[in-house]
Image (cartoon, grey):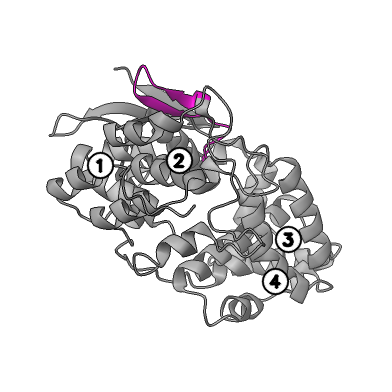
Amino acid sequence: MESFTVKHRSVSITVYPWTHPTGRQYWRFKRNDGKHVTRASLDDAKREAKEHAASVHRGTLDLETLSPEQLRVLRRIIDADPSLRIVDEFLLWHGRKAPKKPTGEALAEFMALKESNAGKSTQNVRTLRKHVKPFADQHSATPLIDLTVGNVEAYLSSNPKNRNRTRRNIRASLVTFFRWCQVREYLPPEKTVAEKTEVPVVGDSIPETYTPQQLQTLINAVRPEFLAWLAIAALAGVRTDEIRPIAGSRKSPLDWSDFQWDRDILIVRPETAKMKRRRVVPIVPALRAILWPIRKDSGPVHEAPPPTKSDGKGMVAETARLGALIGGWKSNALRHSFISYRCAQVGVGVTALEAGNSEAECKASYLDAKSAAEAEAWFSVVREQKGNTAAK
């Protein structure tokens, strides 16, 4: 395999193939700090290399491109203030002299732009609105330049029920908003108040998963209209919002035509995938056995209401009904389980490609060590035909 060069302005990074001691093929590039980044797919490696090149470029200054007059001014500034604190003071002063943009008005522009560029996936827009709008509403009339670190810290700690991971995600959304404001020149080009807040520490946690016995109970008890969703989520790791996008989403739901039965593969199309990248998932024998009797040539795989919602006519959500049979429903545990059990069969690299995640994300958020025997039991569940407990 050949190497590839990724460039951003004057910064070039080489992405090259690398073979793990186990024999698996990966892609690598070397960061500016000397550390190597390894990814399972070439696209992921090139994308991250491009981001790193842009970051390196932003942190460099080519003095040869400056005019003699600019060099002379820089020399005067350094002679007068070797610490260059005067630069921060000037940026703050300059920012306060500029027209003051109200926070609420800036947010309205920000969200309008994000929504117009959302494409078929609106998840990122919903997340930004959820995390940033309450903060902007609190300070709607306050000029952006007058916001303080204290304002952001107070917002991050305003809900004591929020875990560190949630606070970190909220902080990241605020950073995105403030950096956009810098691009629009509503804020000076310095570290934003959101970036100056401390990043909440998120420790590693073991993801919640189901046992093969619990999955067997779920498969036998699920109502027929929810069978395809449950089986695909548990045995192919496809996200619920990929199988059945939430209301208002412009994403294309998983379709029966995405199943290539003759090749035993399921194609998750870019317009369906959360990360907007095509991925291929094997149709394991257990999944084929469950879906084959109910398969169609085309059409949405799941046409029933969302499994997490009640029908408003007295019927409880399917997840709540099933959860009562196994000691409670665990959010995202079907996908967590697929990744954990699949890793025991084929390793993290292959599983990451099938699940549509990076290896690092699989290890950090989804991986719970399972044995080969447990994995075999998970991918051997059957839909019992006699004595089926599914509700009619």
In primary-sequence order, the first of circles 4 and 1 is: 4
In primary-sequence order, the first of circles 1 and 2 is: 2
Nearer the observer: mark 3 or 1; the answer is 1
Q: Amino acid at mark 3?
A: Leu
Of all residues, the one furthest to the front in this rendering is 387
Name the mark on residue 284. none
Residue holding disc 2: 228
SS at mark 3?
loop
Location of residue 32 in the rendering, given as x and y in whole percent from the top left corner: 37, 43
SS at mark 1?
loop
The part of the image, by quadrant, that contains residue 333 is bottom left
- For the record, the magenta segment spans 257-275
In primary-sequence order, the first of circles 3 and 2 is: 3
Q: Who's the residue at 49% across and 47% down the image?
A: 226
Nearer the observer: mark 3 or 2; the answer is 2
Residue holding disc 1: 379
Residue holding disc 3: 187
